[in-house]
Image (cartoon, rainbow, N blue to C red):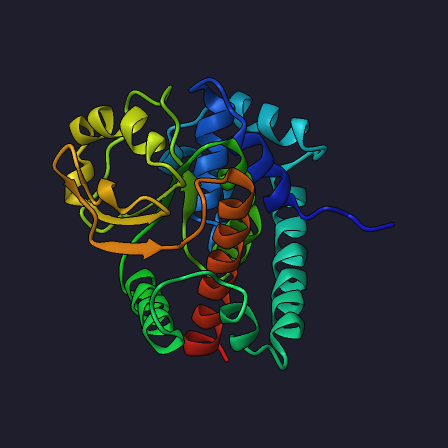
Amino acid sequence: MVMEIIISRILKYLNGCLHDDHMYRIGNFVVKHYTQICQYPLSRFLSEGYFTEEEVTDFFNHLGFHSFDEFKQKLLIDHQLRMEQIHSRMIGVNVNQFLDHLNVKSSKEEFLKLIDDLCELIFNEGRIVIVGALFPSSIAVDFQTDMITLGKEVIEYHHFDKKFQFKDNDIVIFMTSTGRTMEHNAKKMVTQNLCEAYVVLMTQNIKYINFENVCADYVVHVLGKFNGIEFSYQCLMVLDLLRIRYYQKYYQ
């Protein structure tokens, strides 16, 4: 029987969350501090997150744990397991296999340079915020899980989080085939300091590079018809390239 790792379960909950409550806030806190949580005593967890002991107990009970220590032990085991999985999956991986299947205008060398530039940005800056429709966001979960395991905070943007503010070292990845996601989100996100962050636009429609004064700092332009299925496959390959090159550059 294959047991699902805890961070994947937490991501499933967070990505589908509809309310800003203690479950949402505690889950985000775990994602943000994932690689350090095992060194936290409960008192520090409560004070840094501004949680009550009752809220934390409720969160862990929902995940099937009876104590904070039991939760931390499972996180430690999961982290070691996921790192081993990442190491084994990366053995002998050739990025050309992915580049060959991408439909892009630029040459392989140019596109790989863009991927490497994004990896450097991710390494040097803060959290990654993913913005996209349901399907593109859903296929980003493996990317989320691996990058969190490697020490980066990766979250999805949610409209209901009224307190959310972008930071100047955030990397915001917009995944939108036609650009509608930009139209539906950009105006509100600008009031949350979106323009302070690094904006990465992954799209088939480059006319949105400068939409509503939101100037994309990096553009991942994939070709093809405005077809959600084709675009989602290309997004998946780009995200795979990012996590592969990130591992190769900074962990291998």
Q: Residue furthest right?
A: 1
Viewer can see residue 148: yes
Of residues 174 and 64, which is closer to you in this image? 174
Tell me residue 143's x, y (percent): 52, 54
Residue 121 position by quadrant: bottom left
Residue at 51% in and 32% down: 134
Residue at 48% in and 65% down: 241
Q: How many marks?
A: 0
Tell me residue 22's x, y (percent): 47, 22
Residue at 55% in and 39% down: 138
Residue 47 position by quadrant: top left
Of residues 70 and 8, which is closer to you in this image? 8
Of residues 131 and 181, which is closer to you in this image? 181
From what the image shows, is residue 125 above or below residue 207? below
From what the image shows, is residue 30 above or below residue 184? below
Q: In this view, does 192 lie to the left or right of 21?
A: left
Q: Is residue 189 left or right of residue 4?
A: left
Of residues 64 and 68, which is closer to you in this image? 64
Q: In this view, does 167 lie to the left or right of 83?
A: left
Tell me residue 210's x, y (percent): 16, 42
